[in-house]
Amino acid sequence: MTEASKEKEMKQTIDPKLMATLNKLTPLFALIVVFIIFSLMAPQSFTSIRNLELIIRQTTIVGITALGMTLVIISGGIDLSVGSIVALVTVAIAWLLDHGTSPLLAAGGALLVGSLCGLLNGTLITRLKLVPFIITLGTLLIFRGLAKGAAGEQKIDAPLSWLNELLAALKPDHVWMIVPPGVWVLIVLALLVTLILNYTRFGLHTFAVGANEHAARLCGVPVEQTKLAIYTLSGLFAGVAGLMQFARLTVGDPTVAAGLELDAIAAVVIGGGSLAGGEGSVLGTMIGALIMTVIRSGCTQMGLSNWVQEMVTGVIIIGAVVLDRLRHRRAS
């Protein structure tokens, strides 16, 4: 018996449901291992309640962005422009507040800007028939340049408002909320995307397009409309993340969120999403986002330089892609 036939026989003896369950639990095991490692190596402050709350708050921006990226990657696409959209949204909010707009309208403007950016991505991808990598790489530069131009290549200060409390540490009289409002927004959005993916026709179409676009089209799936909606939602989630980024910084900064798109992609892939499309889950993405934040927090607590943290992030991204390839080899 050849090695290939032995490997094939072993695969057939493994219960597919068991393999699927193990794949879903792998990110959780990874999170536990990473947390234990830093608990042993980092100072005791790493496991303090204050630092754990900080980790959760820092995960919010990446997590919300990664929710939109989850939809995109499941559909077999990619969105490299989300970091630039976040920067543009912070500038838009600060500009609106600085010109006397109410905080509620400024927040609505943020969501509108993010949605329009996503709509532009989706329109270009579906109309020009070009790969999403090229389109979103171009809009990454366009949105970033627009943010810098609108801000005059500098930060825009904005008057304080309740928006600044979205990701701030809870005050003593607000401890009943357990976590800041921005974290609750992440939780609600995660539940919403879970429901969309698992219990709606749009979710079914999203998986179908990512698994086999040609077959999905033959089965009557409106591929172009589905892609347009997916990228619009990705832009909308980036708009919400931009709102949280503004709440954290309290200024409009056109240079912020550089590399956020890589963190979001890594979170999805670490969580079990496939860059080939057709696979992914919200729970896995949230765990992946937590892993990224825990690693960065641990590196900071250990006093590691920023360049070391960037290298670690790069290794994580490469490792996530390698794991994605290995999963597909085992499946085949």
Image (cartoon, helix red, strand yellow):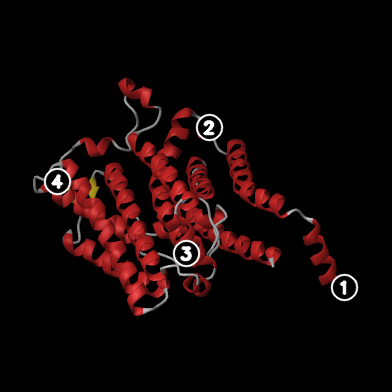
- Give the number of the disc on residue 2: 1
Q: Earlier in the sequence, mark 2 or mark 3?
A: 2
Q: Is residue 169 left or right of residue 69?
A: left
Q: Residues within 10 Å of mark 2 (few under 14, many from 20)?
A: some
Picture layout, residue 28 above or below residue 171: below
Q: What is the spatial separation of the Cα atoms under label 1 and label 3, in whole angstroms?
A: 37 Å
Evaluate if marks 2 and 1 touch, with contact meaning CB atoms under 8 Å apart. no
Which part of the image, by quadrant, shows the N terminus? bottom right
Picture layout, residue 254 above or below residue 185: below
Q: Amino acid at mark 3?
A: Ser
The one nearer the camera, 227 or 38, is 227
In the image, which is nearer the foreground, mark 4 or mark 2?
4
- Reading the image, the residue beneath label 3 is 75
Which part of the image, by quadrant, shows the C terminus? bottom right
Q: What is the spatial separation of the Cα atoms under label 2 and label 1, in whole angstroms?
A: 51 Å
Q: Position of residue 164 (x, y in %)?
A: 25, 38
The one nearer the camera, 186 or 320, is 186
Q: Report helix, strand or loop for mark 2.
A: helix
Q: What is the spatial separation of the Cα atoms under label 4 and label 2, in whole angstroms?
A: 38 Å
Evaluate if marks 2 and 3 touch, with contact meaning CB atoms under 8 Å apart. no
In the image, which is nearer the foreground, mark 1 or mark 4?
1
Q: In the displayed image of the protein, which residue is found farthest to the left? A: 100
Q: Report helix, strand or loop for mark 4.
A: helix
Q: Amino acid at mark 4?
A: Leu
- Reading the image, the residue beneath label 2 is 47
